[in-house]
Image (cartoon, rainbow, N blue to C red):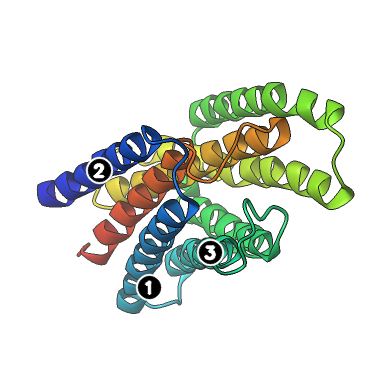
Amino acid sequence: MQRRYLIALALSVAFVAFYLVAGSRGEMPAISSDILFVVVSGTCALLGFLVIKRWGTTGRLRTARLGIFLGVVMWFLGELTWTLYEIALQISIPYPSLADAFYLAGYLPMTVGTFQLLLVFRDLITRSRILFSAFLGALVVGLTSLLLLEPLITNSTDLITMILDLAYPTLDVIVLIPCLFMAVIFRGGVMAGSWRWISLGIALNVVADILFSHGTLTGWYFSGHPIELFYLWGYVSLGLGFQAQRTEL
């Protein structure tokens, strides 16, 4: 277990160093960050597949695992499609594009999986935990509104872009709510660590999505921007959770 954490920490630090070195020479070439995203998200999806292969797809808890795994697969396909746009088609920041169809498709199984998990462990959900999670959720909604509401109102964009700019933060909040419950209710026990890492991974992707939406709305985002570290850290955290579940007794 300690080795697993050390590898994850080393990867996370290496990602930071990678962006610092590339950023010191100007904007990072899109091909560098694109390939990194495909490798990291693909590895995460592979670890999720190994979990499903071991535990199967029947039963309520296994259904939760399958939903989260399918969500990660859709995100991997989104990363792959984004890379094809930027490298093969030479389209910088392909947004909106077919990649968004995969990214958005991942929210459905991810949400089903996380809510199914809460149903399995509903006996652990107390009133105090509901209030605490609701407070955190309201805080996220408030911060997201502060970041995105003004740019959404003032920036003139086409209809599809505006729909996506609204869809991503909305879906992010929906999938984040059960993750907050997961982080609160899993305290101790064999499975606690793996589900906390998974909830953290999803939460980091939510943070990255919100920053990405703000960056594209206000024009400061570019491929290879350091905010992409939140996505990479999210995939590492999800990978840690999958690896822990793969080795659970």
Mark 1 / mark 3, whichever is N-terminal:
1
Figure quadrant of residue 48: bottom left
- Which label was assigned to residue 228? none
Q: Separation of disc 1 and disc 3 at Cα?
A: 27 Å
Mark 3 secondary-structure assignment: helix
Q: Amino acid at mark 1?
A: Phe
216 lies above or below 151? below
Q: Amino acid at mark 3?
A: Ile
Q: Separation of disc 2 and disc 3 at Cα?
A: 23 Å
Q: Separation of disc 1 and disc 2 at Cα?
A: 25 Å
Mark 2 / mark 3, whichever is N-terminal:
2
Neighbourhood count class around disc 2 (C-alpha, 10 Å): few under 14, some 14–19, many 20 upward:
few
In the picture of the structure, the residue carrying the numbered disc 1 is: 49
205 and 108: which one is in front? 205
Please provide percent x and percent y for residue 56. Answer: 38, 78
Mark 2 secondary-structure assignment: helix
- Which label was assigned to residue 87? 3
Question: Quarter holding the C terminus?
Answer: bottom left
6 lies above or below 214? below
Q: In this image, 25 relative to 91: left or right?
A: left
Marks 3 and 1: in contact by CB < 8 Å?
no
Please provide percent x and percent y for residue 20. Answer: 33, 34
Name the residue: 72% across, 29% down: 148
- Camera-nearest label, 2 or 3: 3
26 and 146: which one is in front? 26
In the picture of the structure, the residue carrying the numbered disc 2 is: 14
Q: Amino acid at mark 2?
A: Ala
Q: Is residue 195 visible?
A: no
